[in-house]
Image (tube, rainbow, N blue to C red):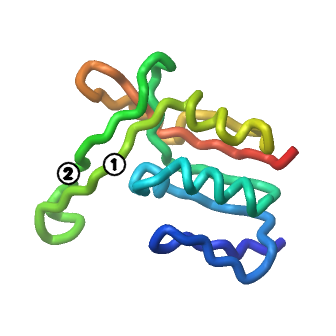
Amino acid sequence: MDCIVTYARGLFYERKNADVLLLSSVLQYLQDTVFVIETIKTKKVLYIIINRIPFFESKAIDNAICIQQLNESIYGKPTSFVCRIMNQDFFISALLNDYEIEIDQINFENLRYDYHGDFFYFRFLLLRRK
């Protein structure tokens, strides 16, 4: 199996046809998630593994932009990132014409987070090309 697709500075770089695309704790930090989804679909990757993506528990809540503040011990100084908590239905529906869900589960740590009274989990998804 080849697995050589990388994402950097808003562009996909491809050295071979990839069988697997791993997106681990990255989609929530990208500025244009819709562009990334559309680009993934054009690459026709056989499997997509999406790990540690925050989805709201309620399907009625839209995406939210927030600031993630990291503990000083991680980078040696206070650090923050803009990130997105997503609506799972909106995200997945963009891929369902081309992919089917093999696995959809809450990540292994099974932690529930509070965002102003709305709750979200980090999830794990395995998608297979139809």
Q: Is residue 121 rendered to the left or right of residue 73?
A: right
Q: Is 29 left, or right, of 44 in this rendering?
A: left
Q: How busy is the neighbourhood of tag 1: few (under 14 within 10 Å), some, or many (20 plus)?
A: some
76 w.r.t. 89: above or below: below
Residue neighbourhood size for the residue with mark 2, other residues' Cα within 10 Å, grouped as few (<14), some (14–19), many (≥20): few
What residue sits right under mark 2 in the picture? 69
**Which quarter of the picture shows residue 11?**
bottom right
In terms of secondary structure, where does tag 1 sit? Answer: strand
Residue at image point 46% right, 53% down? 32
Separation of residues labelled 2 and 1 (CA atoms): 10 Å
Tell me if 58 is positioned left or right of 50 in this view: left
Between 86 and 122, the residue placed more toward the observer is 86
Furthest-right residue in this view: 130
Task: State which quadrant residue 117 falls in.
Answer: top left
Q: Tell me the number on the disc at residue 83.
A: 1
Which image quarter is the C terminus in?
A: top right
Disc tally is 2
Judge whether 62 appears above or below 39 on screen: above
View extreme (bottom): residue: 15
At mark 2, the secondary structure is strand
Q: Horizontal and vertical percent for residue 2?
A: 79, 74
Q: Type of residue at label 2? A: Gln
* Residue sitting at x 47%, y 57%: 26
Dot 2 or dot 1: first in sequence order is 2
Residue at x-position 57% and y-position 58% = 23
Name the amino acid, label 1: Cys
Q: Position of residue 108 (x, y in %)?
A: 53, 41
Nearest to viewer (mark 2 / mark 1): 1
Q: Residue at x 67, y 57 (%)?
A: 40
